[in-house]
Image (cartoon, rainbow, N blue to C red):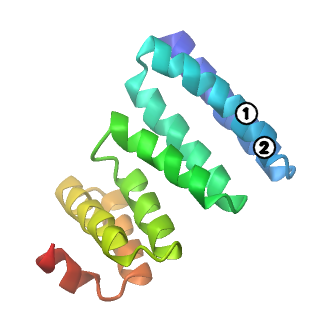
């Protein structure tokens, strides 16, 4: 387990450094290599963290299709991963898929309300900033 955490920590730090230097493709390649190991070794929690991190880098580089794929991967290993749900909602909204974005945002809202931590509360506020009408959505879906 410790080796897993060390590898994940290193990959996140190194991919962040590469991304900040404008080398998003190299950052994503590094993450893809460790994601392959994580799948093979059944590192489910690490899969979620690595996939979300990769989604953020892909989104920042403008590759929404790839970011969406990484978020889907994170949700495969953690269907209630609130940040992956939020990431999917945001990307789908940018791609004009309003109804599907609404469903992901509503699920993110549900998970975050249930979580009740300060981070969950901040996420609920973030949802409200991006989707002011969210209160109506949560009731409809």
Residue drawn 44% across the image and 37% down it: 48
Query: Is residue 72 shown left or right of residue 137?
Result: right
| Disc number placed over residue 29 in the picture, else none | 1
Query: Is residue 99 shown left or right of residue 50?
Result: left
Query: Percent x, y for residue 133?
Result: 30, 88
Query: Real-space Cα distance between discs 2 and 1?
Result: 6 Å
The answer to which of 133 and 92 lies nearer the viewer is 92
Query: Percent x, y for residue 39?
Result: 47, 21
Mark 1 closeness class: few <14, some 14–19, many ≥20 residues within 10 Å: few
Residue drawn 33% across the image and 68% down it: 100
Say which residue label 2 marks.
Answer: 25
- Identify whether 74 is placed above or below 35: below
The kind of secondary structure element at disc 2 is helix
Mark 2 closeness class: few <14, some 14–19, many ≥20 residues within 10 Å: some
Query: Percent x, y for residue 137?
Result: 22, 80
Residue drawn 51% across the image and 20% down it: 38
- Identify whether 45 is placed above or below 53: above
Snapshot quadrant of residue 116? bottom left
Query: Percent x, y for residue 52?
Result: 51, 45
- Report the quarter where the C terminus lies: bottom left
Snapshot quadrant of residue 73? top left
The answer to which of 121 and 40 lies nearer the viewer is 40
Query: Is residue 10 shown left or right of residue 103?
Result: right
The kind of secondary structure element at disc 1 is helix
Given contact means CB atoms under 8 Å apart, are the residues at marks 2 and 1 in contact?
yes
């Amino acid at each position: 387990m410790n080796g897993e955490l060390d590898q994940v920590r290193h990959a996140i730090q190194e991919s962040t450094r590469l991304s900040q230097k404008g080398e998003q493709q190299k950052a994503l390649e590094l993450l893809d290599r460790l994601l392959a190991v994580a799948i093979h070794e059944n590192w489910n929690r690490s899969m979620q963290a690595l996939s979300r991190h990769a989604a953020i880098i892909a989104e920042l580089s403008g590759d929404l299709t790839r970011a969406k794929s990484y978020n889907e991967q994170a949700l495969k290993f953690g269907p209630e991963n609130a940040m992956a749900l939020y990431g999917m909602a945001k990307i789908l909204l940018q791609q004009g898929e309003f109804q599907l974005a609404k469903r992901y945002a509503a699920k993110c809202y549900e998970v975050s309300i249930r979580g009740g931590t300060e981070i969950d509360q901040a996420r609920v506020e973030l949802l409200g900033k991006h989707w002011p009408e969210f209160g109506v959505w949560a009731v409809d879906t």
